[in-house]
Amino acid sequence: MSSAPIKTTSRSAVVAGIHGLRWYICALLFFATTINYIDRQVFSILAPDLQRSIGWSEVEYGYIVTSFQAAYATGYFIVGRMMDSISTRKGFAVIMALWSLAAMAHAGARSVMGFAIARAALGLGEAGNFPASIKTVAEWFPKQERALATGIFNAGSNVGAIAAPILVPWIALTWGWQWAFLVTGAIGFVWLFFWLAMYRRPEEHTRLDKAEFAHIRSDPEESEAKVSWGQVFPKRQTWAFGIAKFMTDPVWWFFLYWLPKFFNQQYGLTLEGIGLPLIIIYLAADVGSIGGGWLSSTLIKRGWTLNAARKTAMLVCALGVVPIVFASQASNLWVAVGLVSLACAAHQGWSANLYTITSDMFPRKAVGSAIGIGGTLGAVGGMFASTGAGYILEFTGSYHSLFVIAGSMYLIALAIIHLMVPKLEPAEL
């Protein structure tokens, strides 16, 4: 791989620093994403019991979910740009504090409106996790490692989704549902302490040795000039990413919010029994997230082009989602769990590579804005899908059509990406 001269004048590089410091930074992103998904999963796990005690319809549940999505879409747009305007260190700290407080605020909700407001505040803060994380990966990793690093931190979403069904029922059954929100929300402040103590940009980090800094900056030198939102918005690279997010993010939101209700309706699973199926599903998703990132990174190291490696990995993942169309007709619980597990694993592998192609096509100074625009479109798609799913289930009582839609979205999205950016060529800014 060709490389430009490494600039070290803006940092105090040391010979003996923390070995593999970039992977410690990746670990911080992993734990942030884990917390992110614990906080957003608490509500969906408690939803069947809350629905019985508070009394809302499927449509009203869809509205509560949509309030999160609407705020999430807004937050993605705002925070994505903020990450390109201020330091990642400060930006991530602000959004972690915001969503942790919002998560704890659910404990005070007593109505549909109360939960909708709390969900909206949570969505506004949680939207910043992925723009901040992808921006951090672009700052700390060369292109050949970015998909793997993204896959690793993205696996935190599945660990969070696993931890939530273990922690939440136990806390709720022991102390009450309010404490489930309070305890999980407070975890974010523990992470915040370590983030502020440890994170700096590579050029500013006093514990980063020269050899690792040279490796991090081994790609051709990028311009450090600021890039305006108006420069990023009209690019076809932005819209290729955004359209793919709009089409496939709603599938993941559907899994997050409706799987507990699906298993409750189809197989009679209650709060006490939902844990094991969800753990299996999200363990599989972890494997998919890391495996999808590993696949494209490995192909690149073997001499494949970025374009061929990323799209091959995405094709494998897109095909892996297709069997989900049979989930609603599964003969027993564990067949359904197997099909959903495969689809979730494939989605997370897809997501790791979809996020990474943004840092392939945009310089570090523009990655946050591009992720913000695409993430907003993904959240808008999720918002419409959440409301639509509520109406479909209210009037049909069947999950079949929802699973058919989910199984088809990824292949269509990949075709659109290939048409719009056939070589994943960098955007000219």
Image (cartoon, rainbow, N blue to C red):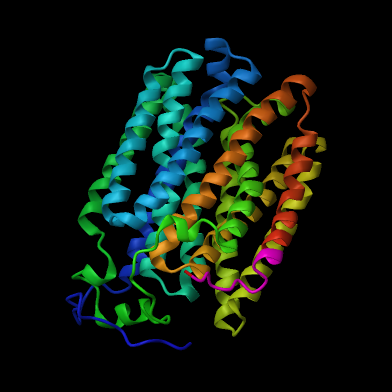
| Placement of 124 over or under 83, stated as above or below | above
Which residue is found at the position 28% from the left and 47% from the top?
93
Residue 237 in view, yes or no: yes
Which residue is found at the position 41% from the left and 17% from the top?
109
Which residue is found at the position 39% from the left and 82% from the top?
218
Nearest the viewer among 294 and 136 is 136
| Placement of 229 over or under 4, stated as above or below | above
Q: Position of residue 62 (x, y in %)?
A: 61, 25
**Residue 209 magenta:** no
Q: Position of residue 411 (x, y in %)?
A: 74, 57
Q: Position of residue 280 (x, y in %)?
A: 60, 45
Q: Is residue 73 left or right of residue 31?
A: right
Residue 28 in view, yes or no: no
| Placement of 68 over or under 145, stated as above or below | above
User: The magenta stretch spans which residues?
Assistant: 418-428
Q: Is residue 85 left or right of residue 152?
A: left
Nearest the viewer among 209 and 282 is 209
Which residue is found at the position 63% from the left and 37% from the top?
254
Number of callouts in the render?
0
Residue 382, by quadrant, is top right
Q: Position of residue 97 (x, y in %)?
A: 30, 39
Q: Characterize the magenta stretch by its predominant secondary structure.
A: loop
Q: Is residue 339 left or right of residue 112?
A: right
Residue 250, by quadrant, is top right
